[in-house]
Amino acid sequence: MMRETLSVKQSVLQNSNGKPQHATCSNTRIPYHEVAMWQSEIAYYRTRFPEYAPVLDIAEAVLREQDALAEEQRSRASPVTVPDLLAAAGRLAAIYPDGPALAAALREALTGDAAAQADPLVWARDLVRGRMPAAVAGLDAFMAALLVPYYDGLRLPNIVVPDAPTAVCSACGGPPLMARFRQEDGATVLGCAFCRSEWLYPRTVCPGCGVDDPAAQRFFYVEGDRGHRVNVCDRCGIYIKAADERVMGRAVALPVEDVVTGHLDLLAAEAGYRRIGV
Ligand SMILES: [Zn+2]
Ligand SMILES: [Zn+2]
């Protein structure tokens, strides 16, 4: 449906300065996990793109519910049980149009699996990381949203500078949700899909296979929106979306960027790439 109205450009992925970007940056605080920041990001898109209102309504409600669940989680001492997770799933499911079906699929998967009963958070994490097939389309994305409040307490306050390139969150083991090219220097920053910690990553290395192969890595964007792109790798077939803050002229909140770039997920899937799960 997008192909009729949008043209997509592809080009070889280039490193902006030809140097590795992971070794030199100092700690920078992550500013936008405050409610005010994602709210202002949502307000920005509401004003500029009224057609995004339906997805922004959902995103805002989900972010608010995730915050509430994270707050409740902070005061609990006991491990998370299957009933806990199902109760939280019910609250998030009430927001998504396909939420009831996803919550039912989750209930079925959790009750029939001994590993899930033993540690539902680890089970859910492995599902999102692509180590288990999702029984129902969209279940992995729903699980990722559901895990956010439980991993929230692990979030690191500063952007991590790993010793070696890694696409796995050092705080919680989660996969990246998206990348952003930092406004001040263009460095690539990956944001965790679970705890929302961030870390630096070299621009030319694929986060799926870890190989620096410029011939295999390309990106595409939709005509008229150079601020959002999809980086794809023809070696391993994964893609990761990225927001270029230098093009957009502002710092972004990745959970909101992920929502307003749903059309890029469709285009990437149509082209045969699968979203990074790590
Ligand atoms: Zn994490
Ligand atoms: Zn790759």
Image (cartoon, rainbow, N blue to C red):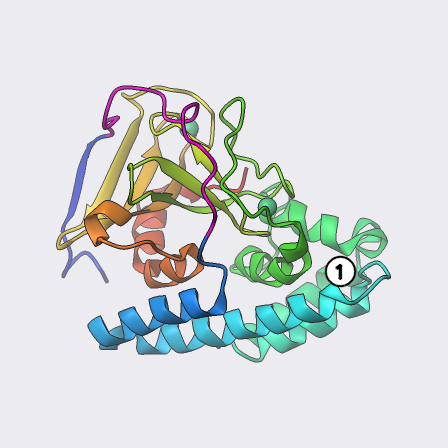
Does residue 27 show up magenta in the picture?
yes
Figure quadrant of residue 140 = bottom right
The residue shown at (54%, 51%) is 196
The residue shown at (32%, 38%) is 231
Specify start and end residues of the magenta stretch as a single range. 13-30
Q: Residues within 10 Å of mark 1 (few under 14, many from 20)?
A: many
Figure quadrant of residue 189 = top left
User: Which sits in the foreground, 31 or 104?
Assistant: 31
- Is residue 96 in view from this perspective? no
Residue 204 horizontal/vertical position (percent): 34, 25
Does residue 119 show up magenta in the picture?
no
Callout 1 amino acid:
Leu
Quarter of the picture holding the C terminus: top right
The residue shown at (34%, 35%) is 187
Secondary structure at badge 1 equals: helix
User: Which sits in the foreground, 163 or 91?
Assistant: 163
Figure quadrant of residue 106 = bottom right
Chief SS of the magenta region:
loop
Residue 200 horizontal/vertical position (percent): 44, 34
Residue 92 as seen in the image, left or right of residue 44: right
Q: Is residue 275 above or below residue 225?
A: above
In the picture of the structure, the residue carrying the numbered disc 1 is 110
Residue 180 horizontal/vertical position (percent): 36, 45
Residue 86 horizontal/vertical position (percent): 73, 70
Q: Is residue 230 above or below residue 150?
A: above
The residue shown at (26%, 37%) is 219
Residue 243 as seen in the image, left or right of residue 103: left
